Image (cartoon, rainbow, N blue to C red):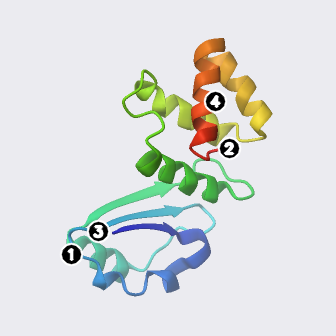
Amino acid sequence: MLFLVDYENIGNMGMKGCHYLNEADRVIIFYSDARRHMERRYLEDIANVGCIFEICKLYKSGKNALDFYITSKLGELFGGGFDGTEYEEMTGEIQKLIEEKKKTPKVIYLNCLHSFGRDNGLAIYNRMKACGEL
C-alpha cells in the first residue's frame, strides 16, 4: 500500500500506527521547515519494517505548496503522463517548472512554450493538464 503523508498538517499524531506497516508498503513523507521534527520512535518503526521509505522536503513554500508536491508525486507515480514518451527524460525539468512557477495555468503554459518550444511545450502542457496537474 502507498502512504503519502502531509507531515506539515498532521505532525506526530498522524504517524501513529506506522508499526503496522509491512515490507510491501511504501511511505513518502512530505514536510517543510514549518514542521520538520518527527519523533524518533516513528522513524525507527518505519525503518525496522523494511518498507520503501522516502522523505521529500518542500523546496519552496507558499499557500498549498505541500499539496502541489503531493499532487505532483501522485502524478509521477500513477499518472504516467510522460512514461514511454519522448518527454520521459524531461520529467525532472517539467516538475521543476510546475513547482517553482506554479502561478496560473496560463503562466505554466507560457513557461512550457518558452522552455520546450512551441510544439513540445504545447504537448507537455496538454499532458500535464490531462494528468490533473493544472
Relative to 51, say whether 39 is above or below: below
Q: Quadrant of the N terminus?
A: bottom left
Query: Which disc is residue 134 wearing?
Result: 2
| C-alpha separation, residue under disc 4 versus residue under disc 1 | 41 Å
* Residue 1 appears in the rendering: yes
| C-alpha separation, residue under disc 1 versus residue under disc 2 | 38 Å
Mark 1 = which residue? 48
Q: Nearer the viewer, mark 1 or mark 2?
A: 2
Relative to 7, say whether 118 is above or below: above
Which badge, 3 or 1, is on the more N-terminal residue?
3
| C-alpha separation, residue under disc 3 versus residue under disc 4 | 32 Å
Mark 4 = which residue? 125
Which badge, 4 or 1, is on the more N-terminal residue?
1
Q: Nearer the viewer, mark 2 or mark 3?
A: 2
Q: Is disc 3 surrounded by few (<14), some (14 to 19) or many (20+) residues within 10 Å? A: some
Mark 3 = which residue? 25
Which badge, 4 or 2, is on the more N-terminal residue?
4
Mark 1 touches mark 2? (CB < 8 Å) = no
Q: Is residue 39 left or right of residue 107?
A: left
Query: Residue drawn at (29%, 74%), measured in percent from left and top?
Result: 46
Which badge, 2 or 3, is on the more N-terminal residue?
3
Name the residue nearer the viewer: 11 or 34.
Answer: 11
**Type of amino acid under label 1:** Asn
Q: Secondary structure at mark 1?
A: helix
| C-alpha separation, residue under disc 2 versus residue under disc 3 | 29 Å
Q: Nearer the viewer, mark 3 or mark 1?
A: 3
